[in-house]
Amino acid sequence: MAKASKALRGRMRSVQNTRKITRTMELVSTSKLKRAQDRVVAARPYAAALAEVIADLVTPELAERFPLLRRPAPPEKGGPRRAAVLLVTSNRGLCGGFNSNLIKEARKRIEALEGRGYQVELHLVGRKGIGFFKYIGRAITTQRQDIGDKPTAQHASELVAGLIEEYSAGRLASVDVVCAKFVSPITTPPTTLGVLPVSTPAVKPGGLKADYILKPGADEILAELLPLYVRNQVYRGLVETAAAEHGARRTAMKNATDNAGEIFELLKRTYNRQRQAAITQEIAEIVGGAAALEG
């Protein structure tokens, strides 16, 4: 009985220590989530404004003159056979199924592209994605582990600069970014953003209204805005994934803390029952011994 009680006390201490760790990680993620969420909120209006300006500027004639707007022919008709997938994951775990869902989304996109005859090049951000694809023996074109949960516009520019150059030269058929979409701290579904070719919402057939005077012209403005729009899309993918990671980790750590509390209460009740049984047995033995002496 003494050994069993000692083992239970050890388990209770272990569960308490684990609960302190998960509770601390939950609080840290909650603190980081607010700042990451602010970056997401700040990035969205700028991206929407960029898309609106490009949609106002683009005409069918201009769309054929800019490589980033032009859609390449499929491989069977002489188009480029290479396609790029940029997967954004986290560097750390303990965030539930967050990274596994992103990897599953990336594999789904890779299979779809390969089924259409493309040779997929994999560009990875985050230690978890890199580790998985290395484990399954998949070739990795580029990898980054230094971005972390505080991405910047410079990081996005570095990631996409080579891809823009390759696409403009006609050597890439498409560029997709697999990242998380931050809907709320508990809703962070994986999503695939098609960043190249650039698809603008509601492209107007007539372009700008006649009373607009552009200086410089639409050509010069689009030449600057299109690469900026692509970089901004990648930046949005980075900041939304960072915010989603903190939301997923906070949820996972809260669940772990609650479960540890339930386990501790169960162990505590078991320990108290064993101790009560031991005390009752000792009292019974004392009473029995006293009765025997009297007899």
Image (cartoon, rainbow, N blue to C red):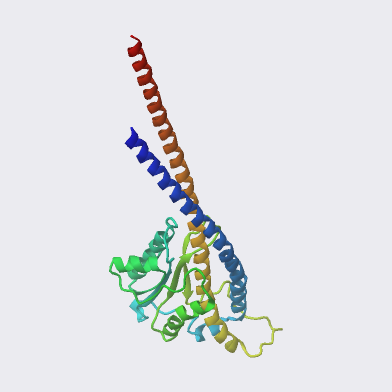
Quarter of the rendering occupied by the C terminus: top left
Give percent across and percent down for residue 178.
44, 68
219 vs 96, nearest the viewer: 96
Give percent across and percent down for residue 54.
59, 79
182 vs 226, nearest the viewer: 182
248 vs 53, nearest the viewer: 248
Residue 223 picture quarter: bottom right
Number of marks drawn: 0
Give percent across and percent down for residue 234.
50, 74
Residue, far top = 295
At x 56% / y 60%, what residue is drawn? Answer: 31
Give percent across and percent down for residue 236.
53, 71
Query: Does any portion of residue 236 appear in the rendered image?
Result: yes
Query: Does any portion of residue 109 appear in the rendered image?
Result: no
Residue 101 picture quarter: bottom left
At x 69% / y 87%, what residue is drawn? Answer: 213
131 vs 207, nearest the viewer: 131
Relative side of 90 to 233, left or right: left
Please tell me whether residue 20 is drawn above or below residue 236 in the rendered image: above
At x 47% / y 70%, what residue is drawn? Answer: 148
Please tell me whether residue 100 is drawn above or below residue 39 in the rendered image: above
Residue, far left = 137
